[in-house]
Amino acid sequence: METLKRLFEDRDGATVLEYGLLAALISVGLLIGLQNFSSALLDMLTFITGTLEAAWA
């Protein structure tokens, strides 16, 4: 019973959980941002490819 009581009083796990949630939030933000960036990059490369193909024709 004493061990269970010590586990509930220990606050180190809360800090680890907070860091884990913060890392997950940052990861989701990066994934969404990079997804938008990759779409814009793909559009730009498609435009450049079309322009170069039209110049050769």
Image: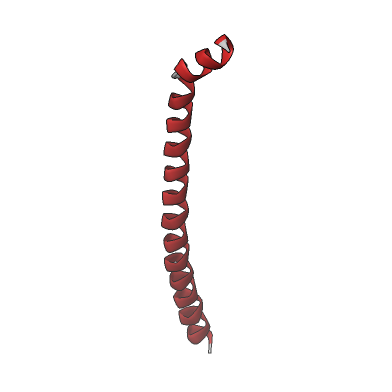
Image quadrant in which you'd find residue 32: bottom left
In front: 14, or 48? 14
Query: Toward which corner of the image does residue 18 lie, by quadrant?
Result: top left
Give the residue at x 48% y 27%: 16
Color theme of the render? secondary structure
Return the x and y of residue 13 as percentages of the image width and height: 49, 23
Q: Is residue 10 above or below residue 40?
A: above
Quarter occupied by the N terminus = top right
Q: Position of residue 38 (x, y in %)?
A: 47, 62
The image shows residue 9, relative to residue 41, as above or below, that is above
Residue 15 in which image quadrant: top left
Residue lying farthest front?
1
Residue 22, above or below 56: above
Q: Measuring 45% from the left and 16% from the top, which residue is drawn there? A: 9
Measured as percent of width and height from the top left, residue 30 is found at: 44, 50
Q: Nearer the viewer, residue 11 or 30?
A: 11
The spot of residue 17 in percent (x, y) is 47, 31
Q: What count of labels does the image hold? A: 0
Can you name the residue that lies furthest to the bottom here?
57
Q: Nearer the viewer, residue 55 or 50?
A: 50
Residue at screen point 48% across, 84% down: 55
Instruction: In the displayed orientation, state which residue is furthest to the top.
Output: 2
In the image: residue 40, left or right of residue 49: left
